[in-house]
Amino acid sequence: MIRTPLASHSPPEDFVATPEASFDAVPQAPDRVYRKIFMRLIPFLMLLWIVAWIDRVNIGFVKMRMLEELGWSEAIYGLGAGIFFLGYFFFEVPSNLLLQKIGAKKTIMRITLGWGVISILMFTVTTPVMFYIMRFLLGVFEAGFYPGIILYLTYWFPANRRAKAFGMFMSASAFAGVLGGPLAGVIMSNMHGVLGLNDWQWVFIIEGIPSIILGFVTWVYLTDRPHQAKWLTTFEKKMVQEELDAENAKLEHREHSMLGALKGKTIWLFIVIFFCIIAANSTLTFYGPSLVSEVGFKDPMVLGWIMAAVNLGGAVAMIANGFISDRTGESRWNTSIGALVGAGSLVAAGLLINVSPLGAILALGLAIIGTMGAIPVFWQMPNHFLTGAAAAGGVALINSIANLAGFGAPYMLGALKDSTGSLTPGLIIIGIVEALAAVLILSFVPKFREARKGAKGNEAAIQQDVEVEA
């Protein structure tokens, strides 16, 4: 049996901190410094994730017009929507290992510029093969961004502050739904025929431009590690490093080797769990607008505003669940309850789609709240088991393999919709799959406990009760 600790965050050998008074003498210093880091990093990372998510999922909003114009089937759309994740699968682990080697700034700039260019080029698609190639390339270029940010945030926040940071960052995907729906509606309502292009083509062009701009801003704005941050004082750098080092010292013998992690059972358990959650999330992403259209709301503007409302609920759930997890030190139940809410609501949406339009949309909203609320807290669990190269490659491996569900689920829904004429069978199947995530977490993921702040406001050392099979 081995005990499982957190990641090593030691600075390079040439880092020298000027001796100053211990931050223990300033009880409020940790809160103030981490708030400063939070406000510097999280809003910008959220902005990057919003534009990435909009570029990834805008085909869900242009689907009906695009299929009608090009004469494609639901199965073609489902395969194209999902093939994005094959690009993710092949390139996510190398991208994250590269981030650890060359830094986040260079890696995220490359990723952002690449996906912006491919997103714009989507307007040239005229055949299914072109559609598949562009979607695959979009996945190739975006690969590494999401797990890269998860790894990057571990360089700046100790574990008991991380779930809130994860929750805020990941809520950007829901905010992208809030913004993306109305934005696509406005573009499609006003740009059809401009310069001889269709409305759906303008969606790809206009929504891809911000990614290219932000790619260059990334190079100027981001800082790779705390000890390199010119916007932190020497005292603040020292305080952050002391907290991360103290945490690491308490949590020994954690898996450092990527090969060692692959030989164990734990990483594969997390892959299966996240696969089940992503199956639901990709279904909601690519077929949420289709469900709204199925129950009678076909106007692009109306559809966009409905999706904005339900995605706003998802954003609130991600932030709130991350905050609760940080306050309580609990992630197993927070993730499981979210997955169960999402699973039950997917089944309900499937059953209500031909019975009650309002009921189906409310169920869709609850499914988004539950599923999205589970995602940021999920990442607290593998972060208790991996460090070093195992963390860099392991987080990416979990995300890349699990995201194959993003390939399979949309294709399965499209094929079932073509053969049965209804989304109901597919939604019920995905609901059952998501429920399996909660069963696996509560049955097989070890419990761990984190101590909260002490009476004087100092950060308590993290106490681990986790034991994993060697």
Image (cartoon, rainbow, N blue to C red):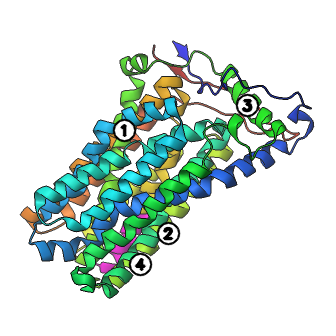
10 Å crowding of disc 3: few (<14), some (14-19), many (20+): many
Residue shown at 65%/39% (left/top)?
156
Residue shown at 65%/45% (left/top)?
326
**Structural distance between the alpha carbons of marks 4 and 2:** 13 Å
Q: Amino acid at mark 2?
A: Leu
Span of residues in magenta = 355-367
The answer to whether one can see residue 147 in this image is yes
Q: Which quadrant holds residue 124? A: bottom left
10 Å crowding of disc 2: few (<14), some (14-19), many (20+): many
Label of residue 312 in the image: 2
* Element at label 2: helix
Marks 3 and 2, the one that precedes in the sequence: 3
Q: Amino acid at mark 4?
A: Pro
**Structural distance between the alpha carbons of marks 1 and 4:** 31 Å
Q: Locate the C terminus by quadrant.
A: top left
Label of residue 92 in the image: 1
Residue on which disc 3 sits? 241
Residue 177 against residue 15 in the figure, above or below: below
Marks 4 and 3, the one that precedes in the sequence: 4
Q: Amino acid at mark 3?
A: Gln
* Element at label 4: helix
Residue shown at 43%/59% (left/top)?
212
Marks 2 and 1, the one that precedes in the sequence: 1
Magenta stretch: includes residue 358? yes
Q: Nearer the viewer, residue 386 or 132?
A: 132
* Residue 292 percent coordinates (x, y): 30, 75
